[in-house]
């Protein structure tokens, strides 16, 4: 079990700890539970799914990286598949606060990167801020997305985001987490695995407003690779850069953000916006100097 979970784990009821321990100790644990594992945990603990998620929230919050605020927020995304996914807020010392990841963004992006197709609910230990409410509004079925908060009855996202502005107002039909496969190729393809991984991520990114698809691949000192895709938003500011998506995945898989050795960003040369300066500068703040930008073109 990763040390960050120990304190929260010890506070759980004995029956839940007993069922949960083998999952947390597994080398393959990715801060997510399959539908079958969720059923097993419910049976062992006697808890319904919603109550189980509340019990697991302290474990999700234990994944928070908050060197600036010291304020840990945990979130759990509930997939239509029955799987659940942890998320937590992330802050980066030496980088602007705008590079911060919110817990709800983390959980949703974590689910997306694990190929979940749709979410039905988000459980979080603090009321979602307006930024996160707008981010959730980018999802298909956002009008039916349930928000679970401690001590409050479940409510739909619309309760927290009335009279919302979203993709429909801009005639956008492809929503965040929809299956897409953009046809891009590297302008200068040398077959480098890290660049290919970033290209694959860019081809599945969500940028219906700017068309500026992009992806990032990170390699740590052990040779592990973590990929992230751009997640754009109708309100623009809640958009999540591809670097942050990759960092979410790395954090959820218990990677050490200070151990990033190399990184590649792929994006279009003539796009309406660029991820390059923020990607380069944030990675440098994390101690990674070997950062490369590669350009992509549409397949003919």
Image: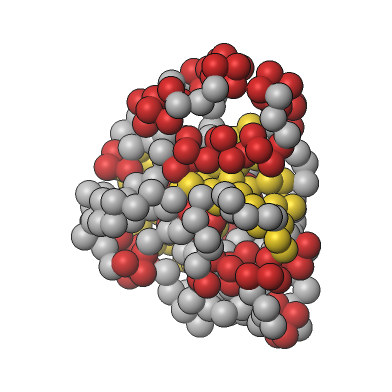
Report the side of 234 relative to 248 (left or right).
right
Q: Nearer the viewer, residue 245 or 138?
A: 138
Q: Residue at x 72, y 63 (%)?
A: 156
Across and down, in percent, residue 231 comes to 57, 64
Report the side of 278 relative to 61 (left or right).
left
Q: Nearer the viewer, residue 79 or 218?
A: 79
The relative height of residue 35 versus residue 232 in the rendered view (above or below) is above
Q: Residue at x 39, y 36 (%)?
A: 255
Quadrant where the N terminus sits is top left
Quadrant where the C terminus sits is bottom right
Q: Is residue 207 visible?
A: no
Report the side of 49 relative to 252 (left or right).
right
| Residue furthest front as drawn | 151
Q: Is residue 160 visible?
A: yes
Across and down, in percent, residue 32 comes to 59, 35
Residue 94 sits in quarter:
bottom left
Report the side of 250 relative to 221 (left or right).
right
Across and down, in percent, residue 294 comes to 43, 61
The relative height of residue 140 versus residue 257 in the rendered view (above or below) is below
The relative height of residue 149 versus residue 234 in the rendered view (above or below) is above
Residue 293 sits in quarter:
bottom left
């Amino acid at each position: 079990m990763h040390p960050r979970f120990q304190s929260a784990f010890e506070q759980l009821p004995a029956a839940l700890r007993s069922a949960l321990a083998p999952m947390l100790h597994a080398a393959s644990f990715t801060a997510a539970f399959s539908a079958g594992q969720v059923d097993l945990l419910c049976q062992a603990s006697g808890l319904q799914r919603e109550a189980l998620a509340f019990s697991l929230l302290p474990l999700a919050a234990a994944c928070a990286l908050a060197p600036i605020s010291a304020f840990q927020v945990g979130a759990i995304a509930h997939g239509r598949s029955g799987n659940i996914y942890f998320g937590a807020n992330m802050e980066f010392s030496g980088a602007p606060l705008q590079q911060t990841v919110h817990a709800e963004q983390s959980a949703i992006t974590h689910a997306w990167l694990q190929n979940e197709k749709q979410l039905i609910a988000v459980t979080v230990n603090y009321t979602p801020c307006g930024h996160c409410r707008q981010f959730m509004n980018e999802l298909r079925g956002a009008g039916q997305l349930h928000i679970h908060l401690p001590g409050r009855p479940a409510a739909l996202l619309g309760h927290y985001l009335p009279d919302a502005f979203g993709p429909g107002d801009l005639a956008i039909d492809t929503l965040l987490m929809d299956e897409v496969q953009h046809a891009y190729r590297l302008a200068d393809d040398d077959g480098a695995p890290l660049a290919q991984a970033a290209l694959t991520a860019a081809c599945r990114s969500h940028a219906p407003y700017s068309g500026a698809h992009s992806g990032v691949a990170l390699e740590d000192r052990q040779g592990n690779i973590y990929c992230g895709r751009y997640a754009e938003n109708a309100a623009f500011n809640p958009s999540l850069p591809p670097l942050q998506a990759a960092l979410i995945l790395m954090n959820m898989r218990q990677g050490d953000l200070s151990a990033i050795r190399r990184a590649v960003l792929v994006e279009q040369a003539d796009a309406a916006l660029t991820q390059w300066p923020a990607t380069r500068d944030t990675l440098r703040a994390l101690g990674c100097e070997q950062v490369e930008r590669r350009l992509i073109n549409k397949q003919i």
